[in-house]
Image: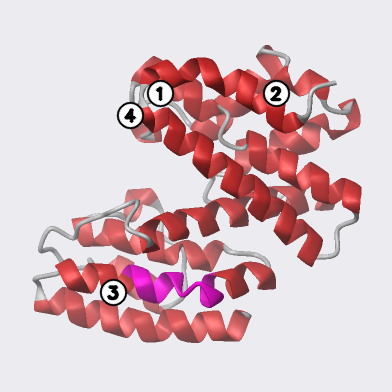
Amino acid sequence: MLSAERAFINYSNPYKRYGENIQLKTDHTLRVKALCADLAEKTGANQQDTKLAGICGLLHDIGRFEQWKRYNTYDDAKSADHGDLGAEILAEDNLIGQFSESDHPLILNAVRYHNKYEVPAGLCERDRYFANLTRDADKIDILFLYASRRLTKSSGGSVLSDPVYHALLDHKGIRKQDVRTKADRVALYLALVFGLNFRRSFEIIRQNDYINKAIDIQLDEAANEAFREQLETARTHLNRYLAEKS
Ligand SMILES: [Fe+2]
């Protein structure tokens, strides 16, 4: 039987002809896989479950390849929900078939719900744990990309809208539909920390200083004095939140 990583590479390789955006997702996937395994291990999972967490990470963005091929965008709002698409592809192409059948619902739930605002209430405890591992790992890597300038969002001279600014100060997640200004799109990324579930996740964010780096990048660019002030206040709140959680 193929290793999960080999099977993933075999699946994703033919999509390379669609350009370098495919490679970005492959690289992201491999980092998320490693993060999932790290989070599982640090939260007390046994060897088998740590491996299973890695598989969830490896498959979480499997929908991205078809999404790019079919729609030429990674914007779910303009194409398809890539979590749902990924779960469909795993089942339809029988990619899921190489994994133990008893793990299929768990893997499909981790893929389907990795990108949703929240995990649905009805999920069993074990499925919720693996979905949350996958969600945290994905968010950590997005913040890494953001803090290392590999993913850039410009505020375009705008400021945070009141609801988004207050969500940041109240430690609340931000929904895409709440975004009003370009600055709000910056906040959307910073607010990812409010959706994290595990102490280890907060530690990784803190140890790598992702939030301060991401804010510094915006301060370098932000011409608008009011936005700079909002960011400095948000920085204090975000750092306090991270300190409490880690
Ligand atoms: Fe994703």
Residue at (51% x, 15% y) in the render: 14
Answer left or right for 161 relative to 50. left
Circle nearer the viewer, 1 or 2: 2
Q: Secondary structure at mark 2?
A: helix
Classify mark 1: residues with Cα within 10 Å, few (<14), some (14-19) or many (20+).
some
> Residue type at mark 3?
Asp
Circle nearer the viewer, 2 or 3: 2
Q: Secondary structure at mark 1?
A: helix
- The type of colouring in the image is secondary structure
Q: Earlier in the sequence, mark 3 or mark 4?
A: 4
Q: Which residue is mark 2?
A: 7
The Cα atoms of the two marked residues, 4 and 1, are separated by 11 Å
Q: Which residue is mark 3?
A: 216
Relative image position of residue 172 (x, y in whole percent)? 46, 69
Circle nearer the viewer, 4 or 2: 2
Q: Which mark is residue 68?
A: 1
Relative image position of residue 81 (x, y in whole percent)? 48, 31
